[in-house]
Amino acid sequence: MTQLPLIPDSDGGIVLEGLDANGESYEQFVFPTSQERVTIRNCSFVNCCTTIGTCQIDFGTRIENVVFENFACGDAIHIDRSVHLSNLIIRGKKPSKVFVKPTGNEGQAVANHGPDAIALDISGYQGDVEVLGLPATTVLHNPERHICVHGNWNERSGEWRAAGVGPLSYLGICLKKVTLGGHECGFFGLPKRRSKLYEEVTTEIQILTDELGLSFG
């Protein structure tokens, strides 16, 4: 079992820096492990895994220039919205899901991401995603696999219903997730192409694009 080489930094936190891991196994990947602040910087994890199957990154962590490629950590990578992200790249088929969203813990500051900086790149990721709370311009995605739903579209919910796309549809539920949290937008994975739901969702997207002029890309 590989141990992560964490070292103290000058600000009283700990740092993981310059690690290029390939095929390594970790018991778990959970940060922070204590009250200390953690910075993960200039690292890559390619074809690595966790034996417990946990990847949870929470408040108190900064991620800068980090790659996860086919990181087998159970069902999902979980990242709290309060984590500061700068050029985090997630690609490949593993794990099957990526979540970046608020955990609901009160008193946690929300990371401020500038509108011109790339926080998250999921353009090469082939699994399901749910990303809430990051500005649209800070996320690179693949429009063939992911959709972007904007919170201000809720003002036109009546037009959605008139077009045949109700609040309990796949797109309607995505919109509700965005608006309930007061987010600017959210990124969601499209259903698998082989499923009936994929046909339904792509049809609804086409209707809302043609009739309301919305863009999900």
Image: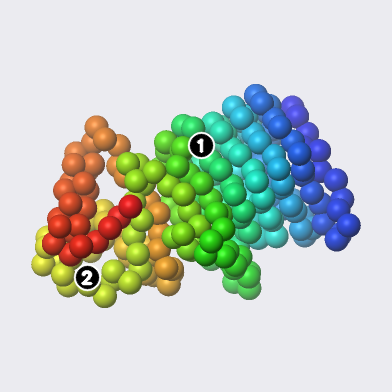
Q: Is residue 80 left or right of residue 175?
A: right
Q: Position of residue 196 (x, y in %)?
A: 19, 39
Nearest to viewer (mark 2 / mark 1): 1
Tell me if mark 1 has few (under 14), some (14-19) or many (20+) residues whose alpha carbon lies within 10 angstroms of its own.
Answer: many
User: What residue would you read off at disc 1?
Assistant: 91
- The residue sitting at the bottom extreme is 155
* Residue 19 visible here: yes
Instruction: Give SS at disc 2.
Output: helix
Q: Could you say which quadrant of the image residue 16 lies in?
A: top right
User: Which residue corresponds to mark 2?
Assistant: 157
Kindly report the distance in space between the C-alpha atoms of the residues bearing marks 2 and 1: 34 Å
Residue 44, image quadrant: top right
Q: Residues within 10 Å of mark 2 (few under 14, many from 20)?
A: some
Check disc 1 and give the amino acid type. Arg
Q: Amino acid at mark 2?
A: Ser
- Check the image and tell me how it is coloured: rainbow
- Up the image or down, 37 lies above or below 180; here it is above
